[in-house]
Amino acid sequence: MYRHFFKRLIDFLSSFFALILLLPFLLIIIVFLYFGNRGSVFFTQERPGLKGKVFRVIKFKTMNDLKDASGNLLPDADRLTATGKFLRSTSLDELPQLINVFKGDMSLIGPRPLLVKYLPLYNERQARRHEVRPGITGWAQVNGRNAISWEQKFELDVYYVDNLSLGLDIKTLYLTVLKVVKRSDINTEGVATTIPFTGTKNDN
């Protein structure tokens, strides 16, 4: 009952009231990003959701669009702004995804929505992460986030799918708050963004 009804109801009500309560705070972030990113505030991108259905995820934009002399975007580490770095370290860049939760594209808690180009790279077990709605935070995020391997993340995602419950969601939410306060596991050491997934050599 929780998986098929109450989880979605909680997501809908929570995102609705959160958006209302956080509106003044969101407006402040928008102002800072407007000047820091030279007018660009939001980042949207197609991501696969429940059953692999593609939707557009929305986040606060943490990198500017500066290019080199040849017209190519500079490396991510060079485009990450001071405001963007702060938003990432506190996970505040994820707040606009409350809109995705309200619409039903996402859940508050579930496997993180990854890139569409990864879809053909998953093995059968890894693809099970799409049996539930993706989340703003998830079991993999509170158990290593970007500090663990892709294979470990996917195993944690499948564990969540198989054990989805109110108790697990409450535990995940509690651990998420702790991670945000400690600002831990934001990225792998020495890189500004997550290392791309290129597939698992052993599909077993």
Image (tube, rainbow, N blue to C red):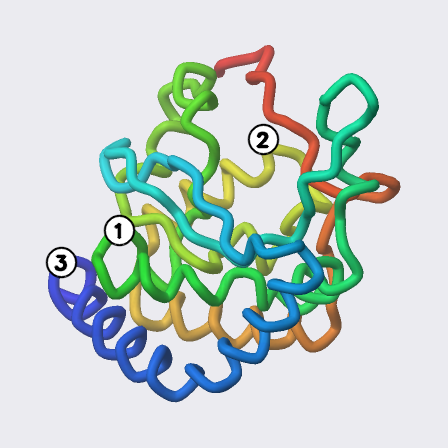
Q: What element carries label 2?
A: helix
Q: Earlier in the sequence, mark 2 or mark 3?
A: 3
Which of the image's four quarters has the N terminus? Answer: bottom left
Disc 2: which residue: 151
Instruction: Name the mark nearer the viewer: 2 or 1.
Output: 1
Between residues 167 and 109, which one lies in front from this camera angle? 109
Q: Look at 22% across and 78% down and name the residue there.
A: 13
Query: Which residue is disc 1 drawn over?
Result: 105
**x and y percentages locating residue 91 in the rendered image:** 61, 64
Q: Residue at x 41, y 74 (%)?
A: 170
The amino acid sitting under disc 1 is: Asp
**Callout 3: helix, strand or loop?**
helix
How many numbered circles does the render carry?
Answer: 3
| Marks 1 and 3, the one that precedes in the sequence | 3
Q: Mark 3 points at which residue?
A: 4
Q: Is mark 1 on a helix, strand or loop?
A: loop
Residue 94, compared with residue 130, is above or below; it is below
Would you say 138 lies left or right of 87 here? left
Q: Does 195 sit left or right of 44 as displayed?
A: right
Estimate how packed mark 2 is, as few (under 14), some (14 to 19) or many (20 or more) residues with alpha carbons within 10 Å. few
Looking at the rendered structure, the kind of residue marked 3 is His
Q: Where is residue 63 in the image (x, y as percent from the top left)?
A: 68, 48
In the depicted structure, whether residue 110 falls above or below residue 179: above
Q: What residue type is labelled 2?
A: Glu
Q: Do the residues labelled 2 and 1 touch (CB within 8 Å)?
A: no
Residue 202 occupies quadrant: top right
